[in-house]
Image (spheres, helix red, strand yellow):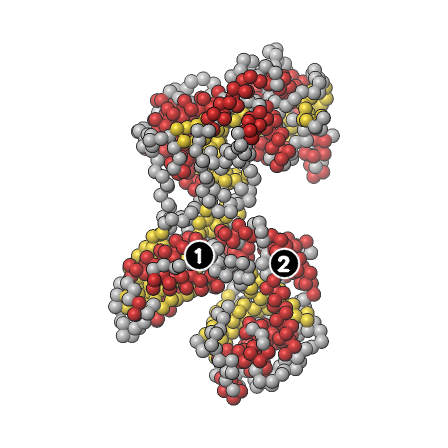
Amino acid sequence: MRFADAVVPAEWASEALLHAPFRGVGSPPAPLTWAQQVTWRADARYGSNHRFLSLRRTVPVSARAGADADRAARALGALVGRHASLRTRVRVIDGEPRQQEAGSGHLPVLVVPGVDDGAAAARDVADRLADVAFDHAQEWPVRAAVVTVDDRVRQVVLVFSHSTVDAHAAEVVLRDLRLLLLRGRLDAPPGPQSADVARLQHTADGRRSARTVAYWLREFDRLPAAPLPDGGPGLTPRLRRGVLVSSAVDVASRMIAARHRVSTSAVLLAGVSALAAARSGRELCGVFPMAHNRFPAGYANAVANLGQIGFCVLDLTGRPTFPEVLSRVWQASLNGLRHAYYDPAALRAAFAAAGRDYDSAFLPHYYFNDVRLPAGGPAPAPEATRGELRAVAARSAFSWTAGLSRSSWHLLTHVVDSPGGVGLTLSADTRHVALDTVEVFLRELEELLVEAAFAEVPWPSPAPAPPPVPSPAVLPATGGEELAYAEFTGGRDATGPLTWGQRAMWRAVEVFESPRHSVLNLRRTLAVSRRADVDVARAVRAVAALVRRHESLRTRVRSVDGELYQSATGAGRLPVLVHPVADAPADPDGRAAASALAVRLGDPRFDHAAEWPMRAAMVTVDGRVRQVVLVFSHSTVDFHATETVLRDLRMLLLRGAVPTPAGPQSLDIAEREGDGERRRGDRAVAYWTRHFPDLTVGLFDPVGPGLTPRYRRGSLVSPAVRHAARLVAARHGVSNATVLLAATAAVLAADGGGDGGGVFTMVNNRFQPGYDGAVSKLNQIGLCRIDLADRPAFAELLTRARAASLDAYRHAYYDPREMERAFAARGLDYHTALAPFCYLNDIRLPPAADADPAGWDEATLRAAAERSAFRWVEELDTFSWRCRLQVVDAPGAVELSVTVDTRYLPPERAEEFLRAVEALLVEAAFRDVPWPWSPPAGPVGE
């Protein structure tokens, strides 16, 4: 049977499956109900959304009832026999879907053991049954299971297809099931079934539909054009759903409803509409409430999908108080619910005839669905004080639930019954609503209702107050320091995924960052001339303009359900530490103070969820700013981006403005990567998986247990490397970076490399159109494979290194998740597979255009090499490479910084490695160097 194949896979083979036979009256094919048509069309166009739409229900069975599995199966058989909708299949006949009631058959029933009252097992099996899409042509639109404890049924689980029944119909079915379990029969006839409703809708109810369609067109024309805000690229899935479970909302809404003689649904809709309208600035809002459509005669107990969406225009001109909002919502929503019974095909055709795109017309407006069950009659208004409600509100719980891939609205509210309160679910389209505002909105709704239960609440403020951003622990002023704030406004609140470069960096942040200090922060200092005469106020304004200009600098990284995303904030303030130099003659330009501040601000790791990704400080001498210190989170920007930021800040300090528009920001890059760059990324992944197996694995053999801590970082500051590399580059017509790459590969190969020399390089990825001025984390690792099989001379190696580096640059822009999947498909862990190789990160700035290509003579260069200074800098507990070589600028020199795994490269060999690179470059500056590229050199330290 289809159900057993799809929903009871082999791993459940130990569980029993009963069959509940049923018998009823069959019928010829009938059309779908209007509500069914909507669901069927959505499934046909977009695929099943069954995990969201399937209706999960459980019926507890008392232990005293003594019901065994066979008795429960008989009750379920009688239930399906009673309600023809539960034995209805939908098949396509002559190109149109038709439903047909079966006269007899049997319903598969899964038997699941449980403990205690079986509730936990019931929840689990409900999710399992709902996790598979219904095959409406083959299986029944209800799935069943019973949970047994000590051979007695304690829970009956039903999962309904929402395309056949709605929530109200499900309650009718559960009521009948309880009676069948207790009494074994039902005397009252069932209500109308799905096919009965469909036949009426396609005949007698047609005129009602025509009136409703005319109403929709007339009212929709009242709505002004309402473009949605740009909220960034959004996330996948597009709509994210936050849930607030609140007893305070339950009590407050009932108090308000009793005082104003309206329903609690109207109270909640008023609160949602007022807040949403205040945020958008609209006065006329389109509101789309879900109607159960049980008002026609005989439909109260119908077992069918009758629920359809109503529509009304809510006029909120004049910024009314909440009681007035409530009055307007009550009248408008009743009008909307009266016009929620219509033929959806006729409505679509009418919108098309009016020149409106039905599929996108409703996106700027609001959907509201209160699916709570009726309380069973009027209940007395609860009594509570303001203090009591506020105390209850403090215990409200917010969480995220499964997102949605599509919707016709950008903001949707669902209201459900929850244990101990009301569950409010806000679904927000992250292309237009910043994800960080979802919880804020729900909690402000709770606050509004609590206040409205006791007072007349005015119109909400246009925007919520931004949550305070904590100052980093290093910033509170000490001594003569002060704390200023660079306030920025005018940006957008936006949400999007991380860029590929950010994703690659984030693992390093999570795995290798110390809780106490960071090795990844980028520390930069900008000197300010005394002649510029910049005071603190002017400098703070420049920093504010800088943050306003570059959205990436006001973007934070957060997590929802384990998924990282970045969130830009349009308005806020950046703390700026102002440090006066106490002894001006000792530090006349503030350079020493700036150096100390760079360490102080740069050492603590960023709290990426709370802090801005840039810290700022200023050094003043005699009341004038002489140095600006900026520390960046490397998870937000790369080295190239910091240069762009410093250039702009220099312009803002001197001229007050930057004449050119800002380059792409992180959210812009993420949007491009999610769409237009996907094919480029796929090509890069294919290149890696093609060439990685050819690399010589393990350039270094293990030499022992290593030191503690295991990783060491050493530094060689060498004027000789600086000048020799320039000489080699000029002599052979290659770049300075290529020279360092070739020298690194040569020394590694001489140390035991094979025919396929592999070096992994950092690529800035600025070659894309428009990316040169991007302020984002773009750089990624490239795979550089150099063919060494014929043991070329160093001059030939330079040519090959240049070609290999260009290949690496072309294939270093990719989605790290796709790379991980591609490696995993080949049985490799991407994060550890690269560890045996050397990683070269050349982060020097391009040399000045007027640099002297002639450089030093050989004697001077060799003498400089004798003066090169090596020192050990840092010890690390964890690191991702056996050998990483960083090349950075140093005053009048180049700094070669190597981080090594001492199990493979003991400290003495690490220093030898750096000095071998230096010696090779000095030799190659004046003559050809054949294989094995190892110039004569004395012992280390000689």
Image coordinates for residue 606, horizontal then vertical, percent: 43, 57
Q: Identify residue for label 2.
A: 684
Q: Residue 590 appears in which quarter of the rendering?
A: bottom left
Does 596 sit above or below residue 34? below
Q: Identify residue for label 1.
A: 662
Residue at 35% x, 25% y is: 383
Q: Which mark is residue 230?
A: none
Separation (CA) of disc 1 from disc 2: 28 Å
- Mark 1 lies on a secondary structure that is loop
N-terminal-most mark, 1 or 2: 1
Does 648 sit above or below residue 146? below
Image coordinates for residue 186, horizontal then vertical, percent: 61, 13
Q: What amino acid is found at the position of numbered circle 1 in the picture?
A: Ala
Q: Indicate left or right for 863 with 152 as reference.
A: left
Image coordinates for residue 749, horizontal then vertical, percent: 65, 74
Residue at 61% x, 68% y is: 805
- Mark 2 lies on a secondary structure that is helix
Q: Nearer the viewer, residue 386 or 617?
A: 617
Image coordinates for residue 501, horizontal then vertical, percent: 53, 57
Q: Indicate left or right for 728 with 892 as reference.
A: right
Q: Confirm whether residue 500 shows in the render.
A: yes
Residue at 53% x, 45% y is: 235
Q: Closer to the observer: label 1 or label 2?
A: 1
